[in-house]
Amino acid sequence: EDQVTQSPEALRLQEGESSSLNCSYTVSGLRGLFWYRQDPGKGPEFLFTLYSAGEEKEKERLKATLTKKESFLHITAPKPEDSATYLCAVQAGSWGKLQFGAGTQVVVTP
Amino acid sequence: DAGVIQSPRHEVTEMGQEVTLRCKPISGHDYLFWYRQTMMRGLELLIYFNNNVPIDDSGMPEDRFSAKMPNASFSTLKIQPSEPRDSAVYFCASSIQGDKLFFGSGTQLSVL
């Protein structure tokens, strides 16, 4: 059975304190790994898609990397506006069908 | 572009009542998804459509749940009869060719 596990469940950072979030997965035939950001009361917002091991993508203070078994979301010098829940999802088998992890809640304090 | 539009934003109903949630996907998107989010189970895929045709409804919890997509611009998720355990946030999302999903703001459903 496909599984997606995110760690830690919650992360509290000081502004400027860099850290990494982990997403480990066990799926058959990975088509893509997705990172989303979700703010309270809103739907998830797309950040990145990674398709193959070794791939990296960056957007502002965020950088996502992918290996054969896990993905990392690195947050460099975070700001309070980076506070959100970060969700990882995998797409395997059928195009379109995403399985989400439970998410990591990140709080960045000034 | 207005994005994915869901209505209502909030719905409070009593157990046994019928609930209908509505979704307008982004124009030109050929996939539409219905997800449910709870604290206990996170985001769960209920059903998804490709070109208005249901592809996978294995996530629909019971026969009380049904979804339709009569055209490319509109979809509904219906719960009849509703139960307290159906309380959750229901999200609709759309995409092009099953790639990155764009989510609506969700419908917060409370069944009393």
Image (cartoon, rainbow, N blue to C red):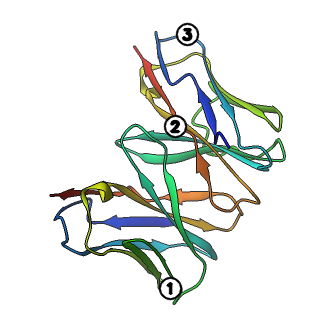
> Residue at position x 65%, y 39% from top?
B2
Looking at this rendering, what residue extends furthest in the bottom direction? A54
Query: What amino acid is at disc 2?
Result: Ser
Q: Which residue is mark 2?
A: B105
Q: Which part of the image, by quadrant, shows the C terminus of chain A?
A: bottom left
Q: Is residue A1 visible?
A: no
**What is the chain letter for disc 1?**
A
Q: Which residue is mark 1?
A: A68
Q: Is residue A73 visible?
A: yes
Front-lying residue, A73 or A25: A73
**What is the chain letter for disc 2?**
B
Q: Sequence order check: which comes first, mark 2 or mark 3?
A: 3
* Numbered label tally: 3
Question: From the viewer's perspective, is B30 left or right of A79?
Answer: right
- In space, the residues marked 3 and 1 are separated at their CA atoms by 47 Å
> Residue at position x 68%, y 58% from top?
A96
Spot occupied by residue A47 in the image (x, y as percentages of width and height): 50, 63
